[in-house]
């Protein structure tokens, strides 16, 4: 079963790689053509020297010989200059193709990720996805660079040079074959060790990235609890492992496989010398100084190229693994774009026998309620009772396991998600602020005019922000704005879209009375003409809502309005009294 899955995955990766490569076939073909020309030129070079040695280097050289040698050496020089030129041009073509491919992959993956169901993100840390889109696609680029720029050219070179050795000296070509099994053993060993240490190294790099990400995001907590030293120790530990495994990779490459291939290259040269020496001594076969020179040059070149292929192979495998990671994201089923769009929405919402769980056990168990257009409904209950989950289902981030949710009588399972969300606005307890100006934060670059943005801000009571100017930049996380001001910006963001359904996740943190007043005024404005869902923590703020649902462990245990629930003298009244006492 696992084998089948791996086979399918491999097929998908290969298909995708091929498709992306085909998209850049022009640059790739040019690069390949230039590489072949370069190889041909590199093969011709030693032949010129061989020709000089055989025909012009003699005891009775005259001026005509010198002139001929000079001309041939000039040709040799031109050939090597051209060789360098073609090699660089080929590299540029391959680099161009690799860059364009990684750009397309990144674009496709990013677009695909935005269409994935939210449930997918529950199981994968955000850092992991970021790393796949950035690091893994970069490695995929390296893969194209490696395969094309290094391995293809070296491969072509090995084949062509071996062909030439066959032509120049058949026995040398046969002698060379005796070294192939040793080359294979060295290659296997090097591949195994490089894979082992680079895999370890990359996993430590991944761990350190995740740790930096987490620590920077939680710097306040780290400093408040004096955890700096603990964090530093943890960081040092991973860092040391990165250093150690990195060193092992270098050692394997420097002392191990590479030296072995260098040694084999010397053995190859010695074999050539022995063959030609034996021929000269015994006179059993014809030898020339030129063909000896050519054979030695070719053997050296062949080993240099084998070294390139061997050294790149480990990296290539790593890059292939990265490509597989990236393409795994593309294999995930995106959410279906349902055709039925909501246009004119009244805002009637009905939950009917809804059961849902993120994992195996349900966190909502048989939720039923109805709210009419323009009404407000609040959800209260202890932490983990399922308040936010109800809203997650309403937003269609998840589908109920059992039961249905209706908006204006239409089942949300059948409604196009984007059209559904266009009718909704969410105001979170901790408003998210983007690192752009106030206008961008309110309008989210959806083409609202300055006047519309200012009006929205004024309507929710953010005069002070309008006075600062809507083109003022808000820096990361909006730390130069007060909590209240950030809330007002997020209110304006919701208000300007004129949602039919508003979801308010009420702030749990204590805010001063002045900010509280401003916020409550903003909320009143927001709630006008909307069906409002409130996730309430402070019961004093929901006295005026039409319906209150009291949740406990995913079940509705009480329902009514503030007055009727107080009269019921149950869970709600207890919570309310407790909060009043603690004020
Ligand atoms: N993405 C998730 N993956 C797995 N379990 C989750 C996820 N989100 C919430 N839960 C679990 O579902 C249950 C209900 O959580 P939910 O956030 O809906 O409660 P809540 O009433 O809104 O809590 P709070 O008042 O603390 O925000 C909890 O046990 C919670 O641990």
Image (cartoon, rainbow, N blue to C red):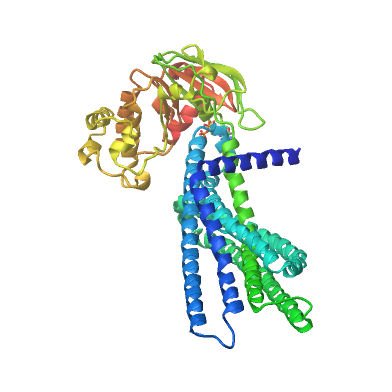
- In the image, what residue occupies the spot 66% across and 70% down? 299
- Residue drawn 64% across the image and 66% down it: 302
Ligand 1 positioned in quadrant: top right
Q: Nearer the viewer, residue 547 or 151?
A: 151
Q: Position of residue 95 (x, y in %)?
A: 48, 53
Instruction: Answer whether residue 485 is visible to the viewer in this image.
Output: yes
Quarter of the picture holding the N terminus: top right
Which residue: 45% across, 14% down? 348
Give coordinates of residue 415: x percent, y percent.
50, 18
Residue 580 occupies quadrant = top left
Query: In this view of the protein, which residue sits in the foreground, 178 or 181?
Result: 178
Q: How many marks?
A: 0
Residue plotted at (34% across, 39% down): 486
Locate residue 431: give its quadrant. top left
> Outermost residue toward the left?
467
Query: Which quadrant of the view contains residue 527?
Result: top left
- Report whether residue 235 is seen: no
Image location of residue 284, percent across then percent down: 79, 78
Quadrant of image for the C terminus: top left
- For the view shown, which residue lies furthest in the bottom direction? 59
Residue 333 in percent (x, y) is at: 59, 31
């Amino acid at each position: 079963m696992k084998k089948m899955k791996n086979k399918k995955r491999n097929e998908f990766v290969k298909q995708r790689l091929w498709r992306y490569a085909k998209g850049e076939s022009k640059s790739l073909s040019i690069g390949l053509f230039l590489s072949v020309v370069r190889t041909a030129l590199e093969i011709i070079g030693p032949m010129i020297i061989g020709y000089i040695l055989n025909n012009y280097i003699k005891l009775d050289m005259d001026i005509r010989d010198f002139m001929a040698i000079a001309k041939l050496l000039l040709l040799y020089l031109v050939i090597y200059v051209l060789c360098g030129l073609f090699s660089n041009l080929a590299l540029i073509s391959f680099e161009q193709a690799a860059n364009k491919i990684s750009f397309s992959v990144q674009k496709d993956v990013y677009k695909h990720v935005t269409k994935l169901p939210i449930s997918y993100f529950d199981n994968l840390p955000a850092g992991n996805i970021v790393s796949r889109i950035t690091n893994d696609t970069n490695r995929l680029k390296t893969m194209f660079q490696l395969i094309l720029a290094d391995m293809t050219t070296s491969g072509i070179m090995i084949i062509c040079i071996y062909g030439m050795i066959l032509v120049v000296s058949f026995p040398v070509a046969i002698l060379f074959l005796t070294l192939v099994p040793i080359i294979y053993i060295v290659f296997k060993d090097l591949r195994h060790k490089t894979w082992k240490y680079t895999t370890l190294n990359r996993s430590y790099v991944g761990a350190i990235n995740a740790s930096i990400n987490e620590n920077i995001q939680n710097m306040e907590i780290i400093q408040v609890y004096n955890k700096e030293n603990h964090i530093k120790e943890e960081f040092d530990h991973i860092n040391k492992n990165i250093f150690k495994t990195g060193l092992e990779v270098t050692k394997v490459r420097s002392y191990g496989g590479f030296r072995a291939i260098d040694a084999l290259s010397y053995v190859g040269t010695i074999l050539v010398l022995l063959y030609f020496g034996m021929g000269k001594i015994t006179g059993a076969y014809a030898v020339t100084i030129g063909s000896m020179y050519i054979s030695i040059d070719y053997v050296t070149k062949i080993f240099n190229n084998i070294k390139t292929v061997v050294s790149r192979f480990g990296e290539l495998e790593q890059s292939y693994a990265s490509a597989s990671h990236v393409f795994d994201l593309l294999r995930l089923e995106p959410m279906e774009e349902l055709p039925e769009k909501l246009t004119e929405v009244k805002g009637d919402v009905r939950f009917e026998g809804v059961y849902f769980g993120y994992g195996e056990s349900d966190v909502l168990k048989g939720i039923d309620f109805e709210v009419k257009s323009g009404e407000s409904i609040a959800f209260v209950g202890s932490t983990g009772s399922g308040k936010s989950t109800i809203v997650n289902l309403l937003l269609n981030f998840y589908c109920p396991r059992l039961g249905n949710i209706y908006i204006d009588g239409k089942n949300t399972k059948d409604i196009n998600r984007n059209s559904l969300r266009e009718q909704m606005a969410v105001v979170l307890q901790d408003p998210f602020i983007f690192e752009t100006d106030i206008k961008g934060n309110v309008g989210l670059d959806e083409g609202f005019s300055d006047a519309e943005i200012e009006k929205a801000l004024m309507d929710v009571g953010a005069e002070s922000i309008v006075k600062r100017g809507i083109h003022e930049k808000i820096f990361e996380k909006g730390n130069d704005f007060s909590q209240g001001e950030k809330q007002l910006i997020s209110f304006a963001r919701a208000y300007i879209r004129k949602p039919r359904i508003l979801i308010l996740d009420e702030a749990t943190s204590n805010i001063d009375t002045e900010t509280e007043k401003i916020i409550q005024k903003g909320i009143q404005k927001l709630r006008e003409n909307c069906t409002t869902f409130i996730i309430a923590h402070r019961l004093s703020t929901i006295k005026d809502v039409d319906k209150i649902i009291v949740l406990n462990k995913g079940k509705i245990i009480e329902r009514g309005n503030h007055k009727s629930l107080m009269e019921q003298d149950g869970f709600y009244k207890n919570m309310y009294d407790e909060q009043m006492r603690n004020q």
